[in-house]
Image (cartoon, helix red, strand yellow):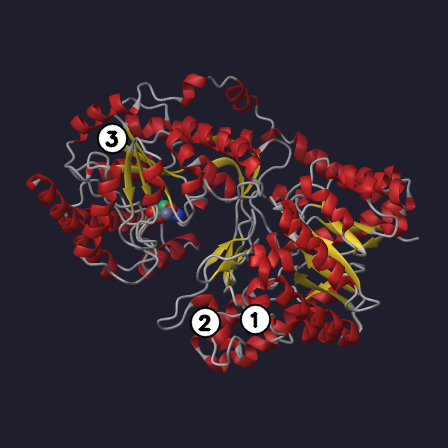
Amino acid sequence: MRIMTQNLGFPRIGRDRELKKAVEAYWKDPRGRSGLLATASSIRQRNWRLQKAAGIDLIPSNDFSFYDQMLDHICLLGCAPSRYTENGRRVANLDEYFAMARGSGDLHALEMTKWLDTNYHYLVPELEADQDFQLASTKPFDEFREALGLGILTKPVLPGPLSFLRLAKCGGKAFDKLSLLPKLLPVYRLILRELRQLGAEWVQFDEPILAMDMEPEERAALLSAYRDLTGAAPGLSLMVCAYFGPYGENLATLLELPVKALHIDTFRAGDDCDALLQGLSPDTMLSLGVVDGRNVWKNDFSKSLKRIAKAREKIGADRLILSPSCSLLHVPISLAQEKPTPLELLPWLSFAEEKLSELGVLARLAQAGNWLSSPEFRANQEAVHDRRDHPAANLAGVRGRVMRLHPEQETRKSPYADRKSGQSARLGLPLYPTTTIGSFPQTEAVRRARANWKKGGATDAEYRSFLEAETLQAIRRQEELGLDVLVHGEFERNDMVEFFGEKLAGFAFTSGGWVQSYGTRCVKPPIIYGDVHRTGPMTLDWAAFAMKATDRPMKGMLTGPVTILKWSFVRDDQPLSETADQIALAIRDEVADLEAAGIPIIQIDEPALREALPLRKSDWKACLDWEVRAFKLASSGVKDETQIHTHMCYCDFGEIMEYIARMDADVISLEASRSRMELLGTFSHFAYPNGIGPGVWDIHSPRIPGPEEMAELLLRARGVLGAENLWINPDCGLKTRGWEEVLPALRNMVEAARSLREKTQAT
Ligand code: GLN
Ligand code: ZN
């Protein structure tokens, strides 16, 4: 018997981000509709043909989306919040669809949140206690038929019912979402029947809930749901896929599911692979995720073939399907036109298209058996060893420094209470100091100047003097506004991670390695391939320039080690904590340089601290422990009089407050205004010990809050946090706003601070 191969999902943005361009053109001008439909269809068809040519047996369909697969599923199940739709809860056209994704007029968009532990964001379904479901779209059927028209029999992909409910939120009052299952399943049954009638042989259900903490009731519901679905369409084989973590106590339930195939992510399943092979019932097939869908590295054939051989021995070739570990949505599409910097990286890389070829080769080699002498195997191992043994990834100096780390390097010299007075004396700040988060508007002019300089249209000196003028203008404006702690504005930075990655050794950049972040937003994450270290100061020149341009305290701005790590593709040959330590030491050196130059305040941003935590709460501690350590390593080399700030945004801080406090920054700024200071609830049970600035202006909205509104938020914050520790700042950096919004909003903020100070004196 031949070993089968499959794919779980392919990136849908198109090789040149055609989908982004077509969707955005449609948003600007609805006459772009036919162009958009044509682009979408050509992307789908190209993807199917490509997978066919790669010899993939089970090729997914319904993995395409104009915006997001969960949004599509909301439309399919007819459960759109009724505020968006004219026709009950059915989404009638593209405009209603995009309105849910982006908001429209007074309608705010569906909430967006990170997909499991990835950097992809999905739109969160909003369900009501009396929610109904109905089959309300034909998308999976249309796509199945479209592929069939090309002679390709696909395997439609659907979010499974339990994960769909789990990843949804309650629209109104909280209720037990499981209570909706009896109404949901009939719609799933209809979908399966229709797909079977069209000729489908397989359907893939994504149930990532199986790698999360599950309640016993959820496990029971999962089992009964699949018992129900499995009989819905005779002749149709169901497959259940989970990824990104071990099954743990859900394994027994998984093994009981009456479906034709189960999928395992061998990179993140811990020891569950053996247990799964052991417990798999004799008529169930196993999809073995042997090609990592979360990184950009070439597969190590030696490891994979061993895994495959072990599985084959246990269950036989005819029950084995080789697969990527998860959907390939999370990696760039193709190396075909790729020119990474440095170029020598190219032979080590594998993007979505290459990963599919790897599957084909793995199946062939596993089938044939004696792979050791095959040229493909040898070439693969050469590349794998070349990467592993490369001098840039084995720098004795960097490794030695990490090995010699000492706990003293992770703690400030004195406790916060003792540092505070020295800092106050040095800085001479008023009560309730005002500041901003770092960036000022990246105007069209700023972006144009950078692009022009990059393509050689301006000399370094010309670009430099442009940036100096922007920086000076930002400083003058901050002085005029009366802000207490100034920033230089970050005009020289493109992106807060890319900027540092470009300066640090050990980082590489792709020329076209785009990955969908959400909707039409794509990112090009840096690749950490070597030992990370600093080759010289990275931010010192601008910080020093800005400091000299004003009498007021100037903050130096850095991105923290955890954020740099989490927004990059990482090496898979050492623990994340080790890479984090390397980056932390590089930032620590930068901090030391800034301090030596006389910068009195240094902010180290960690917006990603809370992101991408493991799916199970019990694994959080281990992860947060090294994250906090990395931050402290980066930040605690300074004198007591140097004030360390940090910033975090757009996450639920409540659950990790204890760790945030352990970071021991002198001041933290947090996003808080969007939820009207809901965050304060956390601090009524947890007394945050250091300085803290809960944001008073939601910078993601064009709305400018007035001084009274901000003062009211601040009064509430003061009630919980106390007057002594309270700072005043916006929610996040201002780079996406225009000056015409920034100036009045900050004026109002300074005004709010003034009135709060007056009120404090009066009492
Ligand atoms: N200092 C960064 C800025 O102001 C912080 C951005 C962020 O939190 N994502 O843009
Ligand atoms: Zn932020």
Give the residue at mark 1: 132
Q: Earlier in the sequence, mark 1 or mark 3?
A: 1
Label 1, label 2: how far apart the Cα atoms are: 21 Å
Question: Which residue is nearer to you in this view: 349 or 7?
Answer: 7
Q: Is residue 227 above or below residue 558?
A: below
Name the residue located 76 percent from the left edge and 77 percent from the top edge: 149
Q: Report the front residue among 105 and 567.
A: 105
Figure disc tally = 3
Q: Position of residue 671 (x, y in %)?
A: 34, 48
Q: Extreme left residue here?
A: 762
Of circles 1 and 2, the one toward us is: 1
- Whole-Å distance between the Cαs marked 2 and 3? 46 Å
What residue is at 66 percent from the left and 35 percent from the top?
Answer: 387
Q: Please name the amino acid that badge 1 sits on.
A: Asp
Q: Which mark is residue 99?
A: 2
Q: Is residue 54 left or right of residue 585?
A: right
Q: Residue at x 23, y 39 (%)?
A: 726
Question: How packed is label 3: few (under 14 Cα within 10 Å), some, or many (20 or more)?
Answer: many
Query: Assess mark 1: CB under 8 A from ligand 2?
Result: no
Q: Is residue 333 above or below residue 247?
A: below
Q: Earlier in the sequence, mark 1 or mark 2?
A: 2
In this view, the mark in front (1 or 3): 1
- Look at 68% across and 76% down and name the residue there: 142
- Measure the alpha-carbon separation of dots 1 and 3: 59 Å
Q: Amino acid at mark 2?
A: Ala
> Do residues under tags 1 and 2 come within 8 Å of each other at their CB atoms?
no
In this picture, residue 662 sits left or right of residue 641:
right
Residue 758, horizontal then vertical, whole percent = 9, 44
Q: Amino acid at mark 3?
A: Pro
- Give SS at disc 1: loop
Q: Which residue is mark 3?
A: 600
